[in-house]
Amino acid sequence: MLFSLAVLPALAGLALWALGVRSRRVLGTVAVATLALTLVLAVLASAGGWTGRLIWSEPLVLTAALTPLSAAVAILVPAIALPVLLYASAHEEPPGLARLIGILLAFTGGMELLVIAADFLTLLIGWELVGAASWALISHRWRDPDNPRAGLTAFVTTRLGDIGLILAAVAAFAATGSFAFGAISALEGSALALVAYGVLFSAAAKSGQVPFAPWLFRAMAGPTSVSALLHAATMVAAGAYILIRLEADLAAAPGWGATTIGIGLGTALAGGLVAVLQPHAKKLLAASTSAHYGLMFVAVGAGYPGVALFHLVAHAAFKALLFLSAGIAGDAAGSYDLSRMRFGRALPVTGALTAVGALALAGLPPLGAAWTKDAVAAAAGHQSVWLAIGVILAGGLSAIYAARFQVLAFGRDPHATAKSRPGTAEPVAAAILAATTLLLSALWLPSVHQPLAELLGVAIAPTKAWELVLAVLTVVAGLAAGALLARRVPLLGTEGHSASAADWLGLPRVFAFCAAATGRTADALSALDRRGIDRAVHLVPAGLKRFAGSLAAADRRAVDGGVEFVASATDALARLARAFGERLTDGIPEGSARLAAVSGAGARRLQTGLAHHYYTILAAGSVLVIATLFVSF
């Protein structure tokens, strides 16, 4: 049942897109009715404790549930989207309007899925749907080649951040066998660190924190209504929301709170300085978005997620209002260059409504945004006095750029002529948001904010008197400085060093340098691969082939020759042996026979028949024997 919060706007958006409805009235009516119904469902779901469960497979289960904090955001999303889509249906260009309204509704559905998620798997699906929809919305005017490139920049940057969330999901599942958020409390050691810092990494990228902040400037290529919804209650809010939702479990990771505070305070100060210098109306507001989400990071890191939630709600109302006003002023000027506006006299209603948002952006009491910002300072002061001073200083910068925006966009200039004027729906949408901003002023009353804190189950750090006095004085001084800056230096940020600093203090150039260096390194490695490794790969078999040929030749010349020589020598020896053997074997019997014959012939000559011959031979033989014996002795 709870999944209906995501399914209803998504299906309505797809239907409008598919049908290609062209009537502004029909588009506006369907969009507003859908979001009003989603808002009612969100209230009923929060009150009734609705849940959702979709079994994908045994280990993969999509679960949805609302905590008090997520219920507040689930109500906030359609409440802010409703006036924004009313504005969009009346204000944006006719070509592709059905597609724009349809994707904005689907975008809202994706954000609702992200908010109601009770496990990492459901969260990732909503997270990616929001990212894909933001790419389509930023690239909406696709005929301008720069817009698809801007959408791609935002898409790639946030996808880079998604690595952290994927890592966190995998680590949680590997350690507990479950994607459920409830399993995080059982984690410890390296598994808890992977989950905590993975979620923080993704949240920083989504919420435009340093160093990811420049993608918000590229996102300004989208229509004004897209910027309003993206910055106020959906895409950029998702990062801060998930930290608020999971802070109770993630804070146990060593150093996590301090790291979150460092990212938030650094972005709040840097974003504030960039916004002060920005000459582009929408980019000024984009830089302020990074700065204010930085303040929410500080509150979460300090252990007060409820304070961050209060500021997220107040910021959503006044930031959507200011973006809608910027769109009206931009159309009237034909440009978002602040130095070409000053439509206070030409567009007095819009100027007055914008003033409400600008003062809320500055944090001037008694507006509710001032209370939430001071609550962030009090939460920071609970950690450190210097941290509280840092937050108050960021608030002072906020006052400077808020005053500068108001004076430049809607200051009174008798010569300013509006090229176009809004119809009825645009001021109505802005008035709804301005009324919401004023209504939030009730947060100053303890009888209002204390019961709300108890309902949400969160703590609010008590504000010290010196923090409140210093914060108010800083805001007043900032408003005066901003107004003076707008009047004396209206072209600030358009040339020279201020123009360089206005582009996120040179971060895009650093990224471009890194990207170029990476590209050159890749080209060099590719050339090395072609000229070195590939050549070596080709040379090795060629060398082996030549070596094998040499071995074959050596085999032929040496081994085969040796074998042939041995065979020849053996054959020669065999022939020699055969000849010698024949002669020896034949010669021995033949010689013996001849010797026997000669001996026989000689013996026959001694047979004379004469006795005296025999006696003489006998005597001679005896003498010879005696002589031999004598010689022997």
Image (cartoon, rainbow, N blue to C red):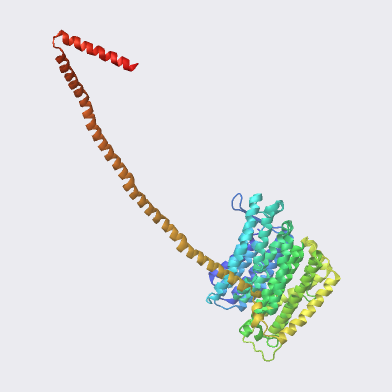
Q: Name the one closer to the observer, 105 or 274.
A: 274
Q: Which residue is farthest top?
A: 611
Q: Is residue 579 left or right of residue 179?
A: left
Q: In this view, does 345 lie above or below 68?
A: below
Which residue sits at x=62%, y=62%?
162
Please identify the quarter of the rendering in which residue 539 is found: bottom left
Q: Is residue 109 left or right of residue 631?
A: right
Expressed as whole percent of the image width and height from the top left, the position of residue 270 reads 70, 73
Q: Name the one closer to the observer, 581 or 378.
A: 581
Please identify the quarter of the rendering in which residue 471 is found: bottom right
Q: Quadrant of the C terminus?
A: top left
Expressed as whole percent of the image width and height from the top left, the position of residue 213 reads 65, 70
Q: Is residue 145 left or right of residue 158?
A: left
Expressed as whole percent of the image width and height from the top left, the position of residue 512 reads 58, 72
Q: Which residue is farthest left?
A: 609
Q: Which residue is farthest right?
A: 465
In this rendering, the count of numbered labels is: 0
Q: Which residue is farthest bottom?
A: 415
Q: Can residue 107 be seen? A: yes
Q: Is residue 559 above or below residue 284?
A: above
Q: Name the one closer to the observer, 334 or 103.
A: 334
Q: In which quarter of the image is the N terminus?
A: bottom right
Q: Name the one closer to the observer, 535 or 163.
A: 535
Q: Can residue 282 be seen? A: no
Expressed as whole percent of the image width and height from the top left, the position of residue 113 reads 64, 62
Q: In this view, does 355 lie above or below 19?
A: below
Please identify the quarter of the rendering in which residue 602 is found: top left
